[in-house]
Amino acid sequence: MTCVEDGLYKLCKENLKPVRKVVKIVRMDSLDAVSLYDDASLDFVFIDGSHDYDSVCKDIDAWLPKVKPNGILAGHDYRYYEGVRRAVDSKLEGAQPIGASWIYYKLGE
């Protein structure tokens, strides 16, 4: 998980306390952090970055290859931002909205 700004980083750490043994917080920009991971190496990726169409598309394109077959790519703010909705709908056939978030199950290859 990437959390760059000080306030967000503190909030991120606090919110993730219950799962700290299975979550690694990486404090850097999403598109820089993606290079730290091999393709098909992650079970779950949650995107909650910029909300404009181009940024969400870049995050999806960068992180989807990092998700293992039968893993999950998900994100936030689907309900609230048109750019998020358009990007998810155009990039991920079968993605499902859940509340304010969205989830995509990467089928096994």
Image: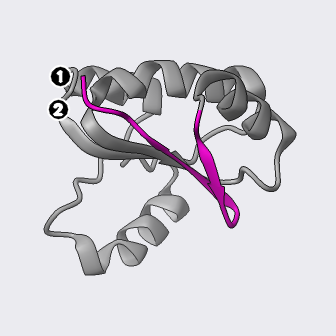
Please report the residue visible at 71 percent of the width from the left and 20 percent of the height from the top. Answer: 54
**Image quadrant for the C terminus?**
top left
Magenta residues span 94-109
In the displayed orientation, state which residue is furthest to the bottom.
18
Q: In whole angstroms, how far apart are the C-alphas of marks 1 and 2?
A: 6 Å
From the top left corner, tell me how far across and down residue 76 is, in percent: 62, 53
Q: Nearer the viewer, residue 85 or 15?
A: 85
Q: Badge 1 local density, few (<14 within 10 Å), some, or many (20+)?
A: few
Residue, disc 1: 38
In the picture shown, does residue 105 fall above or below 13?
above
**Mark 2 falls on what kind of element?**
loop
In the picture shown, does residue 35 fall above or below 5?
above
From the top left corner, tell me how far across and down residue 74 is, in percent: 49, 47
From the top left corner, tell me how far across and down residue 57 is, in percent: 62, 22
From the top left corner, tell me how far across and down residue 95 is, in percent: 58, 41
User: Horizontally, is 43 left or right of 9 in the view?
Assistant: left
Task: Specify the label residue 41 is tagged with.
Answer: 2
Q: Amino acid at mark 1?
A: Asp
Q: Amino acid at mark 2?
A: Ser
**Mark 1 falls on what kind of element?**
loop
Q: Quadrant of residue 29?
A: top left
Q: Badge 2 local density, few (<14 within 10 Å), some, or many (20+)?
A: few
Q: Nearer the viewer, residue 48 or 67?
A: 67
Residue 18 drawn in magenta: no
User: Horizontally, is 90 left or right of 39 in the view?
Assistant: right
- Mark 1 touches mark 2? (CB < 8 Å): yes
Please report the residue visible at 23 percent of the width from the left and 59 percent of the height from the top. Answer: 23
User: Horizontally, is 81 left or right of 58 in the view?
Assistant: right
